[in-house]
Amino acid sequence: MSIILEKVYHTYQPNSPYETHALEDINLEINEGEFIGLIGHTGSGKSTLIQHFNGLLKPSAGRIIVDGMALSDPKTNLREVRRKVGLVFQYPEHQLFEETVYADIAFGPKNLGLSEEEIARRVKRAMKMVELDYETYRDASPFGLSGGEKRRVAIAGVLAMEPKYLVLDEPTAGLDPRGRDEILERVVRLHRENGLTVILVSHSMDDVARFANRLIVMDDARIIYNAEPRKVFSHYETLQKVGLDIPTVTKLMISLHEKGWDVRTDIITIEEAKAEILRVKRGGCGHA
């Protein structure tokens, strides 16, 4: 099953002096099990796009289909769609409001009308998935936690709905390096161990290069690239023109190549760079 967008357009405040075209002719398919990176400069349409995945925004034109359910069909249960597609907004801890961690994570499942036993099962499972010890945190106030812990509670609240697709809008924004690494490691583990489809919106080229198996690049309301990261980052001149960058390690390899090193310039991860530099040095071909 998949999320499919067909010729999707979205216009804010149509037929007014403030009319803004946020999405134009978007054709996209997201398949189960993928880890997708979504990148683009501020105002490119990323946030508008992801809010169409579960019907929070309706397209001005076009069709959206989630696991065979057309969102424009009056018979489609949008609650079911939003259960399948979990969306974690930027700074999700700002949406924490209950007195305890347990109550906050249980909020969504309660709204599904589930039994107390099922709610408890889901809360425990979600806390385990983000590595928050149940006994330690269940009765704690979410407002007394660290930034990274709050972020994990917010993600657990979405996971308790047991979605198939997890959409994260800049999940590491505002966190210190340790909190940032913790969140990313847990997201990657959720993808690998639980089979979650992940759509990660990020401004970090290093992160999407390291984790995503496909990159979607947006500029001026359109998708300009939709391919595996190595192919996307090979267009570094175009990316820079639209306000984006390339991974730090790719810049290093390009610099070494320009200095005469016989190295590949399509390297996108530290592990690849290490292996490539060692290969060149062992071969005695450091400088051309």
Image (cartoon, grey):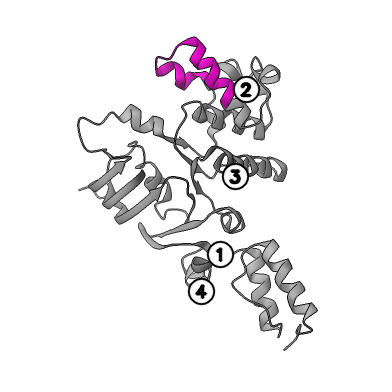
Of the pair 17 and 159, the residue shown nearer to us:
159
Say which of 277 and 153 sits in front. 277
Start-end of magenta stretch? 106-125
The amino acid marked with disc number 2 is Pro
Helix, strand or loop under label 1: loop
- Contact between marks 2 and 3 (CB within 8 A): the answer is no
Residue identified by numbered label 3: 188
Tell which circle, 2 or 3, labels the residue nearer the N-terminal end: 2
Mark 1 or 3, closer to the camera: 3
The residues bearing labels 4 and 1 have C-alpha atoms spaced at a distance of 9 Å
Q: Which mark is residue 142?
A: 2
Above or below, 52 relative to 238: above
Give, as a three-letter code, the residue at label 1: Asp
Q: Which mark lies nearer to you, 4 or 3?
A: 3
Expressed as whole percent of the image width and height from the top left, the position of residue 77 reads 28, 28
Label ID, residue 237: 4
Task: State which quadrant residue 176 falls in.
Answer: top right
Alpha-carbon neighbours of circle 1 within 10 Å: few (<14), some, or many (≥20)? many
Number of residues whose C-alpha sits closer than 10 Å to that of mark 2, classed few (under 14), some (14–19) or many (20 or more): many
Quarter of the picture containing the N terminus is top left
Determine the CA span between mark 4 and mark 3: 29 Å
Disc 3: CA contacts within 10 A as few (<14), some (14-19) or many (>=20): some
Q: Residue at x 32, y 37 (%)?
A: 55
Among numbered discs 4 and 3, the one appearing first in the sequence: 3
Residue at the spot 21% in from the left edge and 30% down from the top edge? 75
| Real-space CA distance between mark 4 and mark 2, rounded to the nearest whole angstrom | 44 Å
User: Vertically, is 237 above or below 79?
Assistant: below
Sequence order check: which comes first, mark 2 or mark 1? 2
